Amino acid sequence: MHSQENQGEVFSQSEYSSATALSTAANYIMNSQKPSTHTYRTYIRLRENGSLTLKFWHSNAVDSTWDMGLEARGSEPGGEWSMEAAYIADGGLAPDGTVAAGTEVPVTFSGAAAKQVAPGETFWSDEASLTLPEGHYLAFTWTIRTAAPGKTFPYNVEGILVSAYDAPGNLAGQESNASFRVSDNLLVLPSYIGYKKKVSKRLVFLGDSITQGVRTAKDEYSYWAARIAEGLGTGYGLWNLGSGWGRAYDVATNGSWLNKAKQGDEVLIVLGVNDLDIGKRSAGELVEDLTHIISLLREANPEVEIILSTVPPFNFEGEREEAWRSVNAQILTAPPAGVSRIFDIAAVLSMPAPADHRVRAEYMSNSDDPHPNGTAGKAVADAFLAWYEGAVSK
């Protein structure tokens, strides 16, 4: 298993594994006109419950570009802000904004309850232990203070996939849901939620909203990354780095997003939709970016296993369809040097040829949105698990 020498990195803590299939990648940044103190409470389904030792790692930087980058761009460092308090607790069976009485455990940083965060800083929390009954959610609550207007802390602005609440003021230690409101397009969490767990392999899924699971049902974890995690079992670590509107050219800048992916023993890359769409990349430019990403991953860890996926269908037409077909043909027949294996996600999601550039109707979020739904998540996960386990057994 690949070891990390830099103690600021995630897998420098080799006894920890990702505790959830939820992606907490950042594609936006808080930009306020005045200073504020605000509390964020999020309910997370963990891969295992019971007696847990948890630890949190955070990167104060945006991972992927939102829209055309005016609001937030890939690898943009966060600003200065501070954590006033952070807690984990038993969130119960129903994520209603409350936590079970008497279960809150403070999360500290080098022994302190509060922490000042510098632009671009990466850091670990101390260990925090909690017993979480089977079927219960982990509630993570923290209060963030910004001392000045402008850009401060990164977060994820996509349609939220889990139950979350927020409230003005320092309410991190409050057990009730008084003053909390339901959050949407506002996932504010540490970059990595780890639990003490020895695993045989650490997988990283590097992708966009399709990997993140955008448009699937809240709290159901029906997207394919979560279903694959469940199918592989807890002997495998799985860190989901899917980030809405992310693109390969964000990763190729060798910034915060790729730095996370470099720390896996095996990396699955599912990118390209946004490059061809909003990014208006040519087929050649996308392949060049994918090739550069693969070389950077292998430079960081010569033993890393790299799985490159075909670009998922997204109902492209005209020049975008032509580019999509060209890229996938190259991935399938002449992939970039350094790729270990190819997974053909397009074959799972696509309609039969010649309409294979379109997503099957039963897999679309709605009639106008080609983001894969939970049914598609099951289809992709089933196909991946059969393919992956077959490849491993050879």
Image (spheres, rainbow, N blue to C red):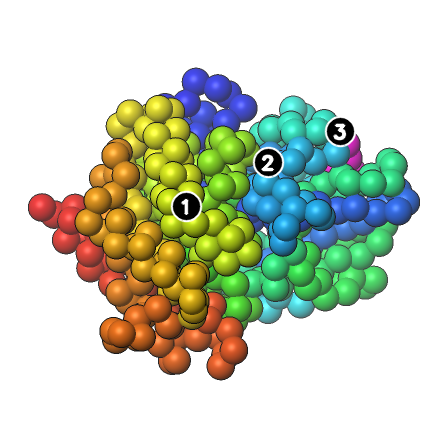
Q: Is residue 116 left or right of residue 210?
A: right
119 in relation to 205, above or below? above
Q: Which residues are magenta?
A: 80-85
Instruction: Name the residue at the left extreme.
Output: 394
Q: Is residue 36 left or right of residue 17?
A: right
* Residue highlighted by disc 1: 286
Looking at the rendered image, the quarter that the N terminus falls into is: top left
The reply to whether the magenta stretch includes residue 82 is yes
Q: Which SS class for mark 1?
A: helix
Percent from the top left, x then y, of residue 326? 31, 55
154 in relation to 3, above or below? below
* Residue highlighted by disc 3: 116
* Residue highlighted by disc 2: 75
Q: Which quadrant would residue 3 be assigned to in this image? A: top left
Q: Specify which label sits upstream in the sequence, 3 or 1.
A: 3
Residue drawn at 20 percent across, 59 percent down = 386
Dominant SS type (magenta): strand
Percent from the top left, x then y, of residue 70? 70, 47
Q: Is residue 42 visible?
A: no
Mark 3–mark 1 distance (CA, rounded to whole Å): 39 Å
